[in-house]
Amino acid sequence: VLKVVNKPALVGWAVKCCAQYLLANLKAGDIDEVQINLLAERMKRNYRDVMAEAASIGTIVHAYAERYFKGLKPAMPRNEFARNGVEAFLKWIKEHEVKPVEVEYRIYSRKHRYCGTGDIDARVDGKRVSLDYKTSSGIWPEYFLQNEAYMIAREEELGIQYDGGIVVR
């Protein structure tokens, strides 16, 4: 559902990825037409490669958090960026009392016709919340829309009332 929400920051980010690729791969001096064409084609794809790497890091951090809340004592990731994400997650956990109700739960709203997977339905510092964690470079408005949609569907499905939602970066 949220793929239709305009994300103007992504345009600038994609252009930045192209420029970074160009600067890393173009050396001073003459290059021929084939090399120019190849460089342009690779520049156009670079943001997808960067996005795939970021998604992989997010997957690793999410898997760690899921295993952590299921009491499985996951191993610390070897990748520096994934490890940073896990360390930030663990720091946040230490700062709050978190009691999971359900981890990685499916939601479906018949009324609004959408579905998804929530990260954690929990009690945090005594309040019932939908907890969503992100590994992005920032907190974006659509994250709150996503979390609110999870709460609306859960309230519809289970008749429960949330005290709020939390997005943890």
Image (cartoon, rainbow, N blue to C red):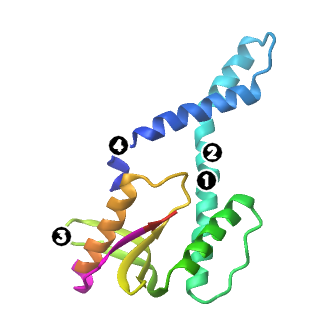
Label located before the other in sequence (1 or 3): 1
> Judging from the image, what secondary structure is the residue with disc 1 in?
helix
Q: CA distance from mark 2 to mark 3?
A: 37 Å
Which stretch appears magenta? 156-166
Q: CA distance from mark 3 to mark 4?
A: 24 Å
Label located before the other in sequence (2 or 3): 2
Residue 160 highlighted magenta (yes or no): yes
Q: Nearer the viewer, mark 2 or mark 3?
A: 2
Q: Which residue is mark 2?
A: 50
Tell me if residue 26 comes above or below residue 45 in the rendering: above
Residue 108 highlighted magenta (yes or no): no
Q: Are marks 1 and 3 in contact (CB under 8 Å)?
A: no
100 left or right of 159?
Answer: right
Q: CA distance from mark 2 to mark 4?
A: 20 Å
Name the residue type under label 1: Ala
Name the residue type under label 4: Asn
Q: Are marks 2 and 1 in contact (CB under 8 Å)?
A: yes
Q: Which residue is mark 1?
A: 54
Of the 4 image quadrants, the one containing the N terminus is bottom left
Label located before the other in sequence (3 or 4): 4
Q: Are marks 3 and 4 in contact (CB under 8 Å)?
A: no
Q: Which residue is mark 4?
A: 6
